[in-house]
Amino acid sequence: MGRERKCILCQIVYSSKQEMDEHMKSMLHHRELENLKGRDCGHECRVCRVTMVSLTDYADHISSRVHKQRVETAEREGAGNDQEEEYFDKDLVKLIEIRKEVIR
């Protein structure tokens, strides 16, 4: 078992990289991203290397056959790869920190 990972945006802890990766693609995470950044924020699919502006377009994309095939391929090729990944860019981290201060 690997080390725990935390989504600092959604405040959820995961026990594996695979669980964290699944969360980062989830609608739950992307809704929270939109709540923080606004409705016109980009929703990135790292597997397909595309960005959608609307949450609806992102939902359609992750439901598509092409996306699902690419995810399967990526999972097969990366099986056992527990390499660390940068999930949050510096600007997003700053926004999350500002939100924490406002909530306090």
Image (tube, grey):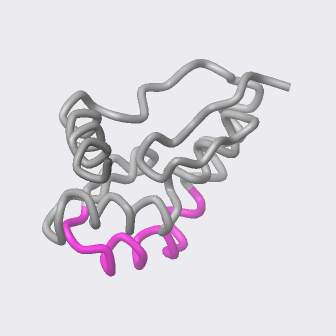
Foreground residue among 33 and 67: 33
Residue at the image point whose x is 59% and y is 48% from the top: 12
Name the magenta segment's main secondary structure.
helix
Residue closer to the observer: 62 or 27: 27
Magenta span covers which residues? 52-69
From the top left corner, tell me how far across and down residue 82 is, in percent.
Answer: 68, 22
Against 54, residue 73 (above or below) is above
Q: Quadrant of the N terminus?
A: top right
Residue 59 horizontal side relative to residue 35, left or right = right
Q: Residue at x 28, y 37 (%)?
A: 97
Whether residue 77 sits left or right of residue 101 in the image: it is right
Question: Where does residue 99 sit, x and y in percent of width and height?
Answer: 26, 48
Q: Quadrant of residue 14?
A: top right
Residue 29, above or below 13 = below
Query: Can you name the residue that lies furthest to the front here?
Result: 104
Question: Magenta segment: does it hold 9?
Answer: no
